[in-house]
């Protein structure tokens, strides 16, 4: 792992994030939109882990101890995953409810938020 | 847990308990709520035994750090000003429950809200921390709003929104003022605190406001606005009539306690914390009070609905409280504070009777009534006796409050504060005449004449328990009018403290925290007069 | 001075109060259990007992040296704050005891009379509840040793007056008359309160600011006021006029007299007791009590004199236009009260009280007599339907004739002495004057004229009622108005409503009580009233004849009530030197009586008959009180109502709520604009968010690069 330059990890993260953003904006199926959001979250996760890993080598001057600094990034990943799971559970529930109500879950036809 | 916490938490937990009761035992909700309120009243009355009159200091103090970093404390304390308001609140909560006895829908929720409202009001009267006070002050709005929305009459939605908008706007400004005050305190004292005991100490020695007249005035007005809307004073009163007309019957009864939070706020916070602003703005506030007295009375006389009529009469009566307080004289302050209590009793009682009547007839329109005295003699008698308190007949409690308030206003002028206030006393005195006008019109329209409306012919007189409840209020009305000393004696030292905090020059003001040796002499003389002395030389020459 | 011997005074006060409580709480039960007569006896007994105790106390007081007849009896604390101590305490002095004797003595007689008069009344207990409460309040008024305590009684009697005027409340007109009485009285009370405040403020200049002293008690206050006001006539005038405003309200002086004629809506014993003998004289009592203030202010005294004289004349003129027997007596009362104020204004305060006393005798007599007539004539009060009643009601006629002679100033009757004393004081006195212009003398001259007018209208009343040539009710019976209960009560629709709380009657069991409404018919035969009613008449008639003479002999009343010299004025003469008063007043009285006999010996003149189109404009104008009452009432009721409504609509709903609605409108309009952006398309929202995020990020990126570039990376 040490051999791989950080730019590759970050580049992959950026790539995944972009796919996610574009997916959210252009797709009409909420399931796919959810998957895209997951993709974005995972891109962020990857970034977190990357920075955490790369901060291990040089100890920041006067900063946190090595282990805790590594832990900080990885802890965030755990948080994000937990929240994402919760979000999917709630989101799918909402979608089921909407589907029951309208027999249709195309987001373009869901404009009840219109002012 | 101290006694004061008990008084607040008993109804609060009771409210939660009721809310959590399963629907299957809903029929027990009323007795349980009444029992809790009765115990609260008993505990409040036990304060009388503990209370030491003769000092303006807080008693039975409790202080727990709540958010120490922010200087916020769960600080409670009792003095002569709050003592009787606490008792009034817990008593009128029971009265409100009596008025709600005929509620059939969502009983549990109704009585839970009544207890919540009681707890919030008691909390507001006992808080010594601005944030804690603000919390309780705002907490009263929620149950009131829910009660109007859930059990109100026609037009409840609009009335509820008007009520919440008006009162909320005022208190938002007060929140800004509270924060500004605390920041100012940090600037002079070095640490953050919302405790009025801390803040007032720096006011007393002149640290806080020296060279900050404008800031003092501005922050005073943020408080004053909130309190004026709450009291309500002219021209911030328009929420009141709509709210009273649309509320369920418990609403106006508890609201007649809630409005005291406004005038109490002036006594507890404005006078000690903003002395110079109080002095310079007193004529303005007395003007508003005087206008309110006469305006409320004139408008009350033409109201077609009995609840609206009583709402405007409240505007008029609360004007006397404000007038008395801002006369900044002993007589005025005692009169104003006494009037707070007596208005609570008489207005609460009248709203109770009116509520029972409206529950029977489902309308508050005066034109629907007439001639009920023949049919409901007990209701008529009790109504009339409470009405006399409201009219301010000598020997009732209303007289003592109004008389001393007016005397205070008169003295404020004569002793050279400004000649204007003699005018206030003269004009406000005419409000007493007008009180007779609108209240006698009210009585005449409901009770005199013949029964013209067939709907009214079916009405039975009050039931024995209803007579008993109302009779208690009648007894209090006349009892505290004939022996006001019981109340005045415990009230006066605190009021004198507040007065000296407001009127003495900086450095010479009493302080709750450090006392003030320089004013002990001035305090102790009236104290001595308060001691139960024997018959002054047989009253002979 | 030991007060021990006078502690009985509390019993005088407590007995009527106990009677009140008994009647209020148990009256109906007693009536059901043992009957009306016992209940009536229980109402009369406390008052009579009070009277006996009062006689005893008065004798004891008279036994003291004149300088010591000023006993304060301590009762207890009432209002006590640092600057002010207002206790319950009673004052026993000649003034208060005179009034106590009148109140309890006349009161007991009228209670006795009322047991007969009200015997057919449905709510017997309620009537005596109010009546006993009135006696108690009136006693507080005269016995209270400070102005605030006096004020309890002052408003208490107003309250009882309100309750008794509105006793027959099912008739809304009575209820409105009651409201009017209370409200007009309250205007006077407003003035009295302000006077009290001014006194407190004035006293504060001599008493230390912080003081537990009883500064408002009369024994402390009056000497202090005297020393303050002697050198400050402006302040004295202010206080005096404010106090007089209160007195004018209660004692029905112009312009606050308007409530008294309407107050005749109450039962006749009430008119006799409250609206003739006792309550309406409390203004005179107040002036006597506070005479130090009036002594210090010639201007205020002149105003008192002038208003008294004007009221006396004004009301006497109105009396000629009245056909209702009670209304005539009401205006006569207003007029006589004017006399009392002339005396007080002239500085001879005891003459006012003297007239209060004699007036209590003969006016109570006249009212009770009128009540007997009304009772005998099936509640018809219009004198135009009376005539030749002397034949049927001999005792009533005899006693009322005595009363009429007394009020007319017939020699050696009680009214003659008191009126003479008042007019003498006015004509001789120099106190009531403004800039050397002696108002008092003019008031005295007006009083002489009014004395003649009084004799005239009383003769008119006597002839129209008891004498004349025909029994007019036989030719012009009263219209019989059936009280129609024509409102159709749809019982069926009322019964099927659900009633979970037991609010309503299960069936329409309320049977409207049919009042035995026996109108005055042409075959009606009047009967003399029973002994419970004629005994008081005879007693009062005796007092009317001999009372004045007895009290006047050796200047007894004067010496008893007000030993000369007065503290500020010194001696006040009551015998004018310039004219022969006795001669002139005899001329006035006899002229009035003879003219009256000439005008009315044949009965009712056509120009005063039932057909009011034949009336002269002057008499119509007099009947309408010269338009004053109507004008003022319209102004107050209509004007006040319009003011209230316009304030409500314009200020409350227009300006204040309009302002608030304006703010709400701003929010609504701006919201309406902004809502266009909310399309509801989730993807659009996401896109906008993306653009926003990208925009912000770019901005910060660029900005930080720029910052680095500007600062050179430092």
Image (cartoon, coloured by chain):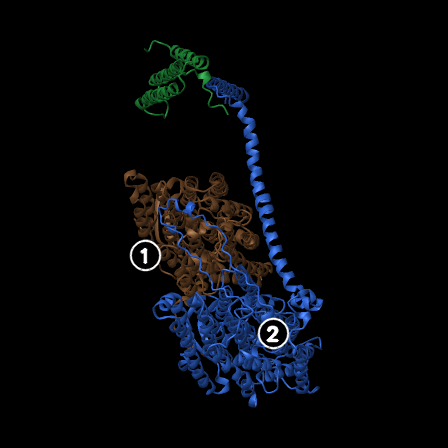
Chain name for mark 1 = B
Q: Secondary structure at mark 1?
A: helix
Residue C181 placement, left or right of B40: right
10 Å neighbourhood of mark 2: few (<14), some, or many (≥20)? many
Q: Is A65 in front, or is B215?
A: B215
The chain letter corresponding to blue is C
Which labelled disc corresponds to residue C90?
Answer: none
Quadrant of res A34? top left
Q: CA distance from mark 1 to mark 2?
A: 60 Å
- Which label sits in the foreground, 1 or 2? 2
Chain name for mark 2 = C
Task: Identify the residue position indicated by label 1 in the image.
Answer: B46
Task: Identify the residue position indicated by label 2 in the image.
Answer: C332
Residue B382 horizontal/vertical position (percent): 42, 59
> What colour denotes chain B?
brown
> What colour denotes chain A?
green
Q: Is A83 in front, or is C451?
A: C451
């Amino acid at each position: 792992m040490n051999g791989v330059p950080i730019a590759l990890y970050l580049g992959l993260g950026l790539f995944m994030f972009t796919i996610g953003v574009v997916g959210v904006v252009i797709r009409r199926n909420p399931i796919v939109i959810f998957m895209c959001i997951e993709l974005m979250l995972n891109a962020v996760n990857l970034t977190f882990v990357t920075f955490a890993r790369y901060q291990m080598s040089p100890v920041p001057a006067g900063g946190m101890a090595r282990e805790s600094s590594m832990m900080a990034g990885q802890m965030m990943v755990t948080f994000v995953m937990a929240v994402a799971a919760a979000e999917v559970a709630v989101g799918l529930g909402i979608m089921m409810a909407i589907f029951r109500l309208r027999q249709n879950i195309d987001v373009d036809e869901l404009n009840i938020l219109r002012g | 847990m101290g006694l004061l916490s008990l008084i607040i938490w008993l109804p609060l937990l009771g409210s939660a308990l009721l809310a959590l009761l399963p629907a299957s035992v809903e029929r027990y909700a009323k007795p349980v709520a009444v029992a809790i309120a009765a115990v609260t009243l008993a505990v409040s009355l036990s304060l009388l035994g503990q209370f030491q009159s003769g000092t303006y200091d807080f008693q039975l103090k409790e202080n727990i750090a709540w958010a120490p970093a922010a200087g916020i404390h769960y600080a409670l304390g009792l003095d002569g000003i709050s003592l009787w308001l606490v008792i009034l609140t817990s008593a009128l909560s029971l009265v409100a429950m009596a008025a709600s006895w005929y509620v059939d829908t969502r009983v549990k929720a109704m009585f839970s809200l009544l207890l919540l409202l009681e707890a919030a009001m008691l909390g507001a009267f006992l808080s010594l921390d601005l944030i804690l006070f603000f919390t309780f002050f705002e907490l009263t709005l929620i149950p009131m709003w829910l009660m109007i929305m859930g059990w109100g009459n026609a037009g409840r939605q609009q009335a509820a929104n008007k009520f919440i908008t008006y009162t909320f706007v005022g208190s938002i400004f007060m929140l800004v003022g509270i924060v500004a005050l605390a920041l100012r305190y940090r600037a002079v004292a070095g640490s953050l605190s919302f405790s009025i005991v801390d803040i007032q100490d720096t006011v007393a020695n002149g640290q806080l406001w020296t060279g900050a007249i404008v800031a003092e005035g501005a922050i005073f007005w943020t408080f004053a606005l909130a309190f004026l809307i709450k009291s309500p004073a002219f021209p911030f009163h328009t929420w009141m009539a709509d709210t009273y007309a649309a509320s369920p019957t418990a609403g106006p009864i508890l609201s007649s306690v809630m409005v005291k939070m406004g005038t109490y706020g002036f006594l507890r916070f404005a006078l000690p914390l903003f002395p110079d602003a109080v002095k310079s703005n007193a004529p303005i506030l007395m003007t508003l009070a005087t206008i309110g007295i006469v305006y409320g009375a004139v408008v009350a006389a033409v109201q077609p609905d009995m609840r609206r009529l009583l709402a405007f009469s409240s505007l008029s009566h609360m004007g006397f409280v404000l007038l008395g307080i801002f006369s900044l004289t002993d007589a005025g302050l005692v009169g104003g504070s006494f009037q707070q209590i007596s208005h609570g009793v008489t207005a609460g009682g009248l709203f109770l009777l009116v509520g029972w009547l409206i529950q029977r007839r489902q309308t508050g329109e005066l034109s629907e009534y007439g001639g009920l005295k023949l049919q409901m003699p007990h209701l008529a008698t009790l109504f009339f006796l409470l009405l006399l308190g409201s009219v301010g007949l000598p020997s009732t409690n209303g007289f003592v409050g109004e008389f001393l308030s007016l005397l205070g206003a008169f003295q404020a002028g004569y002793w050279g504060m400004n000649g204007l206030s003699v005018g206030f006393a003269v004009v406000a005195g005419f409000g007493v005449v007008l009180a007779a006008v609108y209240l006698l019109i009210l009585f005449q329209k409901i009770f005199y004449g013949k029964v013209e409306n067939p709907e009214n012919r079916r009405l039975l007189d009050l039931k024995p328990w209803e007579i008993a409840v109302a009779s208690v209020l009648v007894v209090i009305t006349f009892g505290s009018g004939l022996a006001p000393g019981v109340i005045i004696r415990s009230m006066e030292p605190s009021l004198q403290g507040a007065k000296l905090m407001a009127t003495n020059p900086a450095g010479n003001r009493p302080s709750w925290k450090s006392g003030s040796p320089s004013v002990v002499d001035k305090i102790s003389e009236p104290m001595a007069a308060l001691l139960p002395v024997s018959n002054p030389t047989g009253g002979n020459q | 001075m030991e007060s021990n011997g006078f502690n009985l005074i509390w019993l005088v006060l407590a007995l009527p109060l106990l009677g009140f409580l008994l009647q209020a709480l148990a009256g109906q039960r007693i009536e059901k259990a043992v009957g009306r007569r016992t209940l009536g006896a229980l109402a009369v007994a406390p008052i009579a007992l009070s009277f006996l105790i009062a006689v005893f106390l008065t004798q004891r007081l008279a036994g003291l040296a004149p300088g010591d007849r000023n006993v304060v009896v301590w009762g207890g604390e009432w209002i006590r704050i640092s600057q002010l101590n207002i206790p319950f305490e009673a004052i026993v002095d000649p003034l208060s005891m005179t009034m106590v004797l009148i109140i309890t003595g006349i009161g007991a007689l009228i209670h006795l009379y009322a047991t007969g008069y009200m015997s057919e009344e449905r709510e017997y207990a309620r009537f005596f509840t109010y009546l006993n409460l009135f006696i108690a309040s009136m006693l507080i008024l005269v016995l209270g040793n400070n102005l605030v305590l006096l004020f309890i009684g002052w408003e208490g009697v107003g309250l009882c007056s309100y309750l008794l005027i509105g006793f027959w409340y099912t008739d809304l007109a009575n209820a409105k008359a009651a409201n009017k009485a209370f409200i007009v009285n309250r205007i006077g009370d407003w003035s009295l309160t302000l006077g009290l405040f001014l006194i407190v403020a004035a006293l504060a200049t001599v008493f230390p600011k912080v003081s537990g002293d009883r500064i408002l008690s009369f024994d402390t206050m009056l000497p202090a006021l005297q020393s303050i006001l002697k050198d400050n006539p402006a302040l004295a005038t202010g206080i005096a006029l404010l106090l007089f405003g209160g007195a004018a309200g209660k004692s029905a002086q112009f312009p606050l007299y308007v409530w008294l004629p309407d107050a005749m809506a109450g039962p006749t014993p009430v008119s006799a007791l409250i609206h003739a003998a006792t309550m309406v004289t409390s203004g005179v009592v107040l002036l006597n009590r506070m005479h130090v203030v009036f002594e210090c202010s010639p201007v205020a005294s002149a105003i008192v004199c002038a208003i008294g004289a004007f009221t006396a004349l004004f009301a006497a003129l109105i009396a000629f236009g009245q056909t209702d027997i009670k209304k005539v007596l009401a205006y006569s009362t207003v007029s006589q009260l004017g006399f009392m104020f002339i005396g007080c204004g002239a500085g001879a305060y005891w003459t006012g009280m003297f007239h209060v006393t004699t007036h209590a005798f003969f006016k109570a007599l006249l009212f009770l007599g009128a009540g007997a007539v009304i009772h005998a004539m099936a509640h018809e009060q219009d004198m135009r339907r009376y005539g030749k009643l002397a034949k049927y009601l001999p005792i009533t006629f005899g006693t009322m004739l005595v009363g009429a002679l007394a009020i007319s100033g017939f020699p050696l009757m009680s009214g003659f002495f008191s009126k003479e004393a008042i007019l003498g004081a006015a004509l001789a006195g120099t106190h009531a004057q403004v800039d050397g212009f002696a108002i008092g003398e003019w008031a005295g001259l007006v009083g002489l004229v009014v004395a003649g007018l009084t004799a005239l209208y009383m003769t008119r009343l006597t002839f129209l009622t008891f004498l004349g040539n025909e029994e007019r009710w036989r030719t012009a019976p009263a219209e019989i108005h059936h009280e129609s209960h024509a409102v159709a009560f749809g019982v069926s629709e009322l019964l099927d409503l659900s009633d979970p709380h037991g609010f309503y009657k299960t069936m329409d069991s309320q049977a409207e009580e049919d009042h035995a409404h026996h109108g005055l018919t042409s075959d009606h035969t009047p009967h003399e009233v029973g002994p419970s009613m004629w005994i008081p008449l005879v007693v009062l008639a005796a007092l009317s004849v001999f009372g004045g003479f007895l009290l006047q002999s050796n200047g007894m009343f004067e010496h008893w009530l007000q030993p000369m010299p007065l503290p500020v004025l010194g001696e006040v003469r009551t015998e004018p030197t310039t004219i022969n008063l006795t001669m002139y007043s005899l001329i006035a009285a006899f002229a009035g009586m003879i003219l009256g006999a000439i005008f009315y010996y044949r009965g009712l003149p056509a120009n005063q008959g039932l057909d009011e189109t034949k009336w002269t404009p002057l008499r119509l104008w007099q009947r309408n009180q010269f338009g004053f009452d109507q004008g003022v009432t319209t102004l107050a009721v209509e004007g006040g109502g319009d003011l209230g409504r316009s304030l409500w609509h314009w200020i409350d709903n227009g300006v204040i709520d309009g302002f608030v609605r304006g703010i709400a409108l701003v929010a609504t309009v701006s919201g309406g604009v902004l809502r266009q952006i909310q399309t509801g398309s989730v993807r659009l929202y996401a896109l906008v968010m993306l653009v926003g995020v990208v925009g912000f990020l770019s901005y910060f990126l660029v900005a930080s690069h720029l910052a680095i570039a500007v600062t050179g990376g430092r």
